[in-house]
Image (spheres, rainbow, N blue to C red):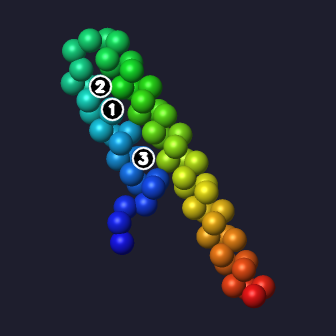
Amino acid sequence: MGMSRSEYYHRQADLCVRMALAAGLYEERVRLLNTANEYRDMASRAEARDSHDATQRSTARRDG
């Protein structure tokens, strides 16, 4: 099985942080760190959605 959506977003956030550390210009660092935070937010939403979906499947199996 491939990478989950939340894992993908976490990986993208990590890459942005690494690039920010290597960036020469302050504006580049800030932009990359902001992008990393956006990816972390997307990862959190994906994890919450995955958790909700898993709960729904569990409930459907129990009630079905």
Classify residue 28 as left or right of residue 64. Answer: left
Give me the disc on residue 20: 2
Q: Position of residue 6 (x, y in %)?
A: 46, 53
Q: Which residue is mark 3?
A: 9
Secondary element under disc 3, as helix, strand or loop, is: helix
Q: Is residue 21 above or below residue 15?
A: above
| Left or right, 39 with reference to 23 | right
- In the image, what residue occupies the spot 30% across and 38% down? 15
Q: Quadrant of residue 4?
A: bottom left
Q: Secondary structure at mark 1?
A: helix
For label 2, the crowd category at 10 Å Cα-Cα, with few meaning under 14, some 14 to 19 and many 20 or more, is many
Dot 2: what SS?
helix
Amino acid type, mark 3: Tyr
The Cα atoms of the two marked residues, 3 and 2, are separated by: 16 Å
Tags 1 and 2 in contact by the CB under 8 Å rule? yes
Label 3 Cα neighbours within 10 Å, binned few <14 / some 14-19 / many ≥20: many
Residue type at numbered disc 2: Ala
Whole-Å distance between the Cαs marked 1 and 2? 5 Å
Place of residue 7 in the rendered image (x, y in percent of width and height, measured from the top left): 41, 54
| Separation (CA) of disc 3 from disc 1 | 12 Å
The residue beneath circle 1 is: 17
Disc 1 packing (10 Å; few <14; some 14–19; many ≥20): many
